Amino acid sequence: MESVVTDPEAWDLTIIRAQGLRLMRPEKSWRPIVTLEVDKHIRHEAVLGVDGQNPNLKQYFRFYDVKPTSTVEMQVWHRSQSKKKSKKRNLVASATHSLGDLLRRVEGEKGVLGKRSKTSLLPQHILAPSPHNASNSTRLTVSPRPPSPSPSSSSCDAPVPPYTETDITAVDLEVGNGKKSSSSSDDKGKAKEEEVKEVQKNQWWETFLGNFTLYLDLRDARTDSDFEAVLQQLKMEWTFMGGFLAAIGAVDVAIFAISNDSVVHLSSLCLSSVALSSIYTGLGVTSLAYFILRYYFSPPHLFL
């Protein structure tokens, strides 16, 4: 890893590699998605290669205002590759540790107790949630960097093998009863079955709302990048609706400005409709003003 300037108030954590992930899925090759979550609100995501290595080691997870008792949850997700636009993810493994426990494990791995290393590699075991995979543990190597007393430069001490995109051959999977099964050409069929289950899981009202709102995108969002994408779409809608409501308000004002002796005669029903339109336009502008002031210039974690 190249040298970076360390913020004395920040914690930095880098995902290096993951091992044993190929035994959790029947596909010949898949790219695991690893998410890190601190105290249930600070999220980070990294997409690893098919060999389990992180192709972008320069991207590290920086977070502030944490304590040694803060919890760090590591999750490994699988996303179907049969459909490029599929956003549904399946959880295949997870683990939870406290930040202080991770630091103590780092010091134990380095053999220097009581002394904080600038950068250390820490393998963590995470378990699959399904019972038949409970015996197969996965090693996820992360690199936590605690806050330093003063700004300084740090680099990765342990060498990391270069990332290479390689093809993976068929993998034997040992299930709980001792039998072995290998991945074959029916992987695509299993992926299609999972997608059918995803569609069937949505209720009719969820599908109805998802046709003209961002309900499904917001429901399936898991990381900061997902929430940020939804927030960007909402900002565009708020901007459009703000201009639309302003135009309606201008039309209402113009109608009210028509005098009684003008060529165009307005009935009482027409005036009542315009008054009702003005009331609802004002309520819409008020709601938009709240959302814009609250979320428009806010970071994604406030949107959560």
Image: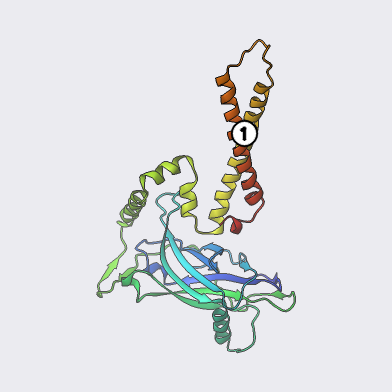
**Residue at which label 1 appears:** 245
Q: Can residue 21 be seen in this view?
A: yes
Q: Nearer the viewer, residue 43 or 128?
A: 43
Q: In this view, does 20 lie to the left or right of 7?
A: left
Q: In which quarter of the image is residue 269?
A: top right
Task: Give me the residue at 58% from left, 70% from top.
Answer: 14
Of residue 236 and residue 21, the one placed in the foreground of this image is 236
- Residue drawn at the location 59% of the way across and 75% of the way down: 144
302 up-or-down from 23: above or below: above
Q: Can residue 163 be seen in this view?
A: no
Q: Outermost residue, front direction?
A: 268
Residue drawn where x is 63% and y is 12% of the image: 264
Camera-side residue of 276 and 169: 276
Q: Which residue is drawn at 53% across and 54% down?
A: 226
**Secondary structure under the numbered disc 1 in the rendered image:** helix
> Which quadrant does the C terminus fall into?
bottom right
- The x and y percentages for residue 113 are 60, 89
Position of residue 294 measured from the top left corner of the image (x, y, whole percent) = 64, 51
